[in-house]
Amino acid sequence: MTDLILSPNLENADGFYADLVAAHDGLVKADSDVQNARLVLVLANHIGNANVLSSALKAATLKDT
Amino acid sequence: MSRLLRDAVLDLSEHYEFARQLVNSGRFSTPCSYTASSLNSADALNGPELTRPGSACPDAPLSDEFLLPKLAGKFTLLTIDADAPDRIEEGGVQATRLALSVKDDLSLELKRRYLGDATGAVYLIRPDQHVAARRDTFEENAFRQAIRRATGKE
């Protein structure tokens, strides 16, 4: 069974962070919010695995399982 | 937040197949909403978005039956813990009152869907069970105008 990876796994962390910020450049909050929501859905679909997604949701809410 | 996600899913579904799978699930199966139609009157109730003018009426359990069958085929002045005349006629079109109270529904769905934070409401419901207008109290001129708008006369 695949587990959620919480150890460093980004190929280019700084590069990704910069891209993420740039993707929101000039957007008002409402547009930024829906952009974030779309990104969540795109990435969630890529991950696909229900167990990993469930773990990811828990990790994001900052609550212990 | 759920509205945010709904918009995100709809945006994505125009471009990517994966998102259409999310559109088909139960939470998106709301009937067509005519909110932009000129047959509607402006929303004058601080009520739930689910039942704003143009929306299809959601059902709700009443003491021994359900709401929707009572709304079919005619204009209804639906009052929930609010007063209104039993009948109003405008331009040959008649609307009859259906007087309800949140006390009629122990499940509180009626309150949740039609009142929200409001303590009372008067709805004009079309024969096709869509909301034409709503206010927190009955105002004759407003509802007469709503009937005219709903029948394409204004």
Image (tube, rainbow, N blue to C red):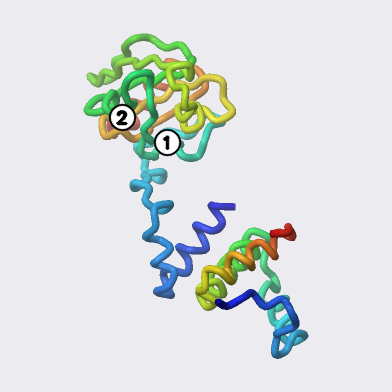
Above/below status of B30 relative to A20: above
Residue at point 34%, 37% (across, down): B39
Of the two numbered discs 1 and 2 in the rendering, the one whose residue sits closer to the viewer: 2
Location of mark 1 (residue): B53
Above/below status of B86 relative to B105: above
* Residue B51 on image: x %, y %: 44, 36
The answer to which quarter of the image holds residue A23 is bottom right
Question: Is residue B138 visible to the viewer in this orientation of the structure?
Answer: no
Mark 1 is surrounded, within 10 Å at the Cα level, by few (under 14), some (14 to 19) or many (20 or more) other residues, namely: many
Question: What is the number of the mark on residue B68?
Answer: 2
Count of number-bearing discs: 2
Taking depth in this image into account, of B131 and B98 the one nearest to the observer is B98
Q: Label 1 lies in what chain?
A: B
Residue at point 39%, 67% (across, down): B20
The answer to which quarter of the image holds residue B142 is top left
Amino acid on which the number 2 mark rests in the picture: Leu
* Residue B132 on image: x %, y %: 37, 32
Side of B7 where B58 appears, left or right: left
Nearer the N terminus, badge 1 or badge 2?
1
Residue at point 63%, 59% (across, down): A30
Q: Separation of disc 1 and disc 2 at Cα? A: 16 Å
Above/below status of B25 relative to B66: below
